[in-house]
Amino acid sequence: MLRIEGYVIVSADGMLADANRVMPEALKFKGDLEFFTSGLDDAAVVVHGRNSFEDQPNSPLRKRIILTHRVAGVEPDPENEKATLWNPAGASFEDACSHAGVRDGTAAIIGGPTVFEMFLDRYDTFWLSEAPHVRLPGGEGCFPAVPDSSPQAVLTAHGLQPREVRILDAKNDVGVTAWRRT
């Protein structure tokens, strides 16, 4: 059985990127990076849009599914033998996983906003890291509904509830909350 887990760090105003759609240094914290890296290292597959990536030493070793409209359904990525290109309009997530050779384990969803939204009713856990002292006015929200709604309100509306909280960087009050399906 495949578990679906989301991973994101957001600013106090729910943004995952600045107005230029770039994750700024202000949202990068060692403890969160270690948590994120560990989650991806344990995942069977990483799922993201064409503009999202994790840029880590182990990145080339990970199986991934990349959402794109450049293909009709599911195809191998000609630039990365470990990647599957997937168009949700032409194939199911299960088809993409099958093409990638993934049948169980964890699918780690790492964004962007539209990709996070696609899985809102399927997440087993959504790991929401928060940097409460960082604000990114005019930035890109972690879900399309942000900033009109908070990330927490979006997760709650889709049947996820906050469970355990872990402190990742005490100096900067950065923590992660596991939002789990009720």
Image (spheres, rainbow, N blue to C red):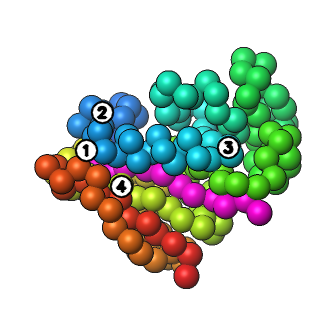
Q: Mark 2 points at which residue?
A: 24
Closer to us: 145 or 13: 13
Disc 2/disc 1 C-alpha distance (Å)? 9 Å
Q: Name the residue under label 4.
A: 129
Packing grade of label 2 (10 A; few <14, some 14-19, many >=20) is few
User: Magenta region: which residues?
Assistant: 1-13
Closer to us: 66 or 28: 28
Q: Along the horizontal axis of the image, is 6 left or right of 178?
A: right
Q: Which amino acid does label 1 sit on?
A: Leu
Q: Do the residues labelled 2 and 1 touch (CB within 8 Å)?
A: yes
Residue 63 drawn at (x, y percent): 69, 35
Q: Name the residue under label 3.
A: 45
Disc 1/disc 3 C-alpha distance (Å)? 30 Å
Q: Mark 1 points at which residue?
A: 136
- Precedes in sequence: disc 1 or disc 3: 3
Which of label 4 and label 1 is nearer to you? 4
User: Which picture quadrant has residue 148?
Assistant: bottom left
Q: Do the residues labelled 2 and 3 touch (CB within 8 Å)?
A: no
- Quadrant location of the N terminus? bottom right
Disc 4/disc 1 C-alpha distance (Å)? 15 Å
